[in-house]
Amino acid sequence: MFGYVSVAQLSADIRAKLQDIPQTIDLVVGIPRSGMIPAYLIGLYLNRHVVDLETFLANGVAGHGHTRKVGIDIAEPQAARHILLVDDSLMTGGSLQRSIERIRASSFSGKLTTCAAIVMPAAGSSVDLFFREMPRPRIFEWNAFHHDMIEKSCFDLDGILCVDPTREECDDGPRYQEFLRTARPLFKPTRKIGHIVSARLEKHRAPTEAWLAANGISYGALHLIDLPSEADRRRLRAHSPHKAKVYRETDAVLFYESELEQAKDIARLSGRPVLCTADMTLQLPTALQLAASLKQARWRLKIPVGRLKRWLRQQARARALAR
């Protein structure tokens, strides 16, 4: 029950409203870290210098590539006559206001325009520019591995937390045992994961738990497949059904899956959204699957009908944007 924005969607939103950005802006200042993503996109499209807030306050070097001539060149950041201060989102506005106060307390005497890429509905009046309205809860591609939603999510293991084993390593023997011990880490969430749901076999629990501990990955529960062999798992095509079953039976609100086809299957079988990390798209169940899932969720969690209807409308809009 949340909204999702990818980097591709953010880029499209910015391009759609480039004409709303004052042409007199000669410097884009991003609020680290997330604000640097829309700041750099705006800077690229407008061909303006981009710096982070700390560099601006220190009047540091506003660098750019040697092969590109910047549209409006400035000697140093605080020599700018008109800056655009950018953050990725706006909720209470506290972070943006603190940044404004720091800029006003510096030696900068030019014009300041504020921008938040994504704002809460009816909060757009708190900034000069925004590109999209979206209520909470919401998650963005660029904070997907750091959001507090992780604590109520399911995570695939191979292909997300570590690399996938090669075809040769999937021998269910010595080479696979070596992979379990030495797999190279990939994404490392900065919060405790609610559930790790892997198609690994239950007999490999000990080395899997050892690898997770050695790599500092915190989690609540580890769900593996209770089958005797890799051949049985392949024969039964147990990957997606196992993951969808765990997803349905937990209070998780999102599943992180590395393979696109499995992500689609898990969304279909669970009736819940799945974030595919292969292309960072949100895979959503169909309307019929949503209805079945919501009927069960409403009965179990006693969710008000009005809230479910609002969520259905949000998901319909999300599916339309994803096409």
Image: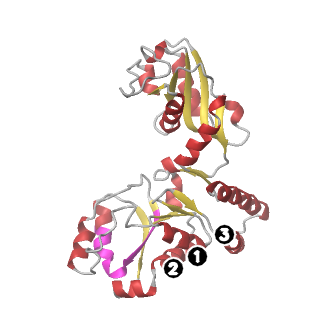
Q: How many marks?
A: 3
Boundaries of the magenta span: 194-210
Callouts 2 and 1 close, C-beta under 8 Å: yes
Is 284 rendered above or below residue 270?
Answer: above
Q: Position of residue 91 (x, y in %)?
A: 63, 40
Disc 2 vs disc 3: which is toward the camera? 3
| Residue under pointer 2 | 241
Callout 1: SS = helix
Q: Secondary structure at mark 3?
A: loop
Q: Counting residues from the N terminus, which is met first, the one under dot 1 or under dot 3? A: 1
- Magenta stretch encompasses residue 206: yes
Question: Where, quadrant-wise, is the C terminus in this rendering?
Answer: bottom right
Q: Residue at x 62, y 41 (%)?
A: 13
Nearer to us in this view, 63 or 208: 63
Q: CA distance from mark 2 to mark 3?
A: 17 Å
Crowding near the residue tagged with mark 2, few <14, some 14–19, many ≥20 C-alpha atoms within 10 Å: some
Against 156, is 112 above or below?
A: above
Q: Are marks 1 and 3 in contact (CB under 8 Å)?
A: no
Q: Which residue is mark 1?
A: 269
The Cα atoms of the two marked residues, 2 and 1, are separated by 7 Å
Q: Give the amino acid at mark 3.
A: Thr
In the rendered view, would you say 25 is above or below 310? above
Estimate the x, y position of residue 112 in percent, counting from the top left. Answer: 59, 20
Mark 2 or mark 1, which has the lower sequence index? 2
Q: Nearer the viewer, residue 222 or 310?
A: 310
Dot placed on the residue nearer the N-terminal end, 2 or 3: 2
Residue at x 32%, y 71% (from the top left corner): 208
- Looking at the figure, which quarter contains the N terminus? bottom right
Q: Amino acid at mark 2?
A: Pro
Residue tagged by mark 3? 286
Q: Which mark is residue 63?
A: none
Q: Residues within 10 Å of mark 1 (few under 14, many from 20)?
A: some
